[in-house]
Image (cartoon, rainbow, N blue to C red):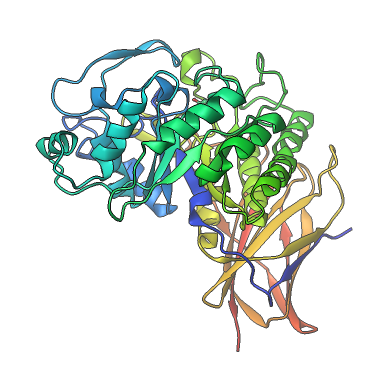
Amino acid sequence: MNPIIYVDAAHPGSQISRLIYGQFAEHLGRCIYGGVFVGKDSAIPNVNGIRQDVVEALRAIRVPMIRWPGGCFADEYHWRDGIGENRKRMVNTNWGGVVEDNSFGTHEFLELCRQVGCEPYINANVGSGSVREMAEWVEYLNSDGDSSVVQERWKNGQKEAFGVRYFGVGNENWGCGGNMRPEYYADEYRRYQTYCRNYGDHRLFRIACGPSEGDWHWTETLMERAGHCMDGLTLHYYTVPTSDWKDKGSATEFDLEMYYRTLERALRMEDLIRGHLAIMDRYDPEKKVKLLVDEWGTWHNVEPGTNPGFLYQQNTMRDAMVASVTLDIFQHHADRLGICCIAQMVNVLQAMILTEGDKMVLTPTYHVFGMYRDHQDAQALETGVLADRIPGGAKQISASASVRDGKITVTCSNLDGEKAAPVSVYLQGVRAEILGGEVLCGAPQSMNTFEQPDQVAPKSIDGAEVTAHGDGTQVTFTMPACSVATLHLNVLG
Ligand code: AHR
């Protein structure tokens, strides 16, 4: 069957929060040090120590949010070690046992967000911290009162409150964040969040640690006991191609069967979101609490010869496809998802950017985020697909669409690893003209390297045909095997 994508263009739905295109940046391997922060004295062009090539690349895809400092690192991070002069050194016990000199701390993170032009999301320490430590971090960030904590901020050069809104109370507290039972964490969450005060207009969006994958009991317990005092509950889900954490499979060497298995694993995100939302809805029928998928992406074996604790992996068209199908799922749940952050931004797991010294490579995943950027804050359009199935049972085509200011964006992926697909996109209820489009394609194993950085990059779509059809518009074009495409349309009349 020739695939058909049906878009209900006449009935715009919920707004797609731009924050579902967020990034996660942890003190892990070369994500922060080397990837983002090189220090003021570096020969790599930087502003206040932050490398400018990376900032420019992140701005180009309109990164809307960065979550920091972890991850597992968050629950052994003591924020005072990362401010002012003479910063304390520590050993990063979670990630490679390397020395952390704390030269990148609160001020540097907020400077990064200022340069990228995005929202900060700070994840604080419950596992090895204290209520007072967390409360004072919030005060340091957001208070304008004349307290000794605020004076400390003034002394460190920041007069105005930073005004951080998104604040996480612990990370993976069922695991690296303290191995807690949900009953225990729910009580701890209630206590900690009590002292995370709102200062003036700076009102916090309080985020509780949610489940791993399909841990329905964690969600049930948190919603029942603490749902009334949170704004968001997190969900973490990683796509491990082999499903075996001990041998996750190579990032670059895999066959077609593993490609399809990877997509099948990635598409599990749909069931996880539905399952957790169904539980949340029982305790929160007014749907005040958002679900936040603030860690997601592919997790492969590290690149041979690299530090196993640094989680450095290459990124292929297979990863790009995981990104596109996952972003489609997020857009279909635009009404309930508040924030999503891919793990991680630079040099770690499913990264946007890889760096080596002063060199930088944009990954296929980076390009997908670029091709989806026009969806940010647009209104979702309901989308359906008629298509054959690929091995593993998923539909050959995944798609999502949105509209803003009379401009429609349709993004779609051909998951078939071998066959091109002649696709018809039917926009019901509007006459539209095509403004342009891009396609990203390659063999599932194709990637960008420091030697060949532009092997995988978007190209413009040739030969798309637009016709009036009933009360709508039909666009037909051919999608290569293993490809992601974006169509930009203008609504007429
Ligand atoms: O992203 C890497 C790690 O994965 C994070 O530190 C942790 O939260 C998760 O287990």
Which residue lies most toward the bottom here? 493
Percent from the top left, x then y, of residue 367? 52, 48
Quadrant containing the C terminus in the rendered view: bottom right
Quadrant containing the N terminus in the rendered view: bottom right
In the image, what residue occupies the spot 78% across and 55% down?
421
In the figure, is residue 302 to the left or right of 260? left
Q: Is residue 382 above or below residue 189?
A: below
In the figure, is residue 315 to the left or right of 48? right
Name the foreground residue: 314 vs 20.
Answer: 20
In the image, what residue occupies the spot 14% across and 46% down?
159
Percent from the top left, x then y, of residue 190? 48, 34
Q: Quadrant of residue 439?
A: bottom right
Percent from the top left, x then y, of residue 341? 51, 41
Q: Is residue 151 above or below residue 286?
A: above
Counting labels gives 0
Name the foreground residue: 475 vs 447.
Answer: 475
Which residue lies most toward the left here? 155
Percent from the top left, x then y, of residue 76? 39, 19
In the figure, is residue 357 to the left or right of 28? left
Q: Is residue 457 above or below residue 187?
A: below
The answer to whether residue 451 is seen in the rendering is: no
Q: Quadrant of residue 44?
A: top left
The answer to whether residue 160 is seen in the rendering is: yes
Name the foreground residue: 302 vs 462.
Answer: 302
Q: Quadrant of residue 326?
A: top right
Q: Is residue 408 above or below residue 194?
A: below
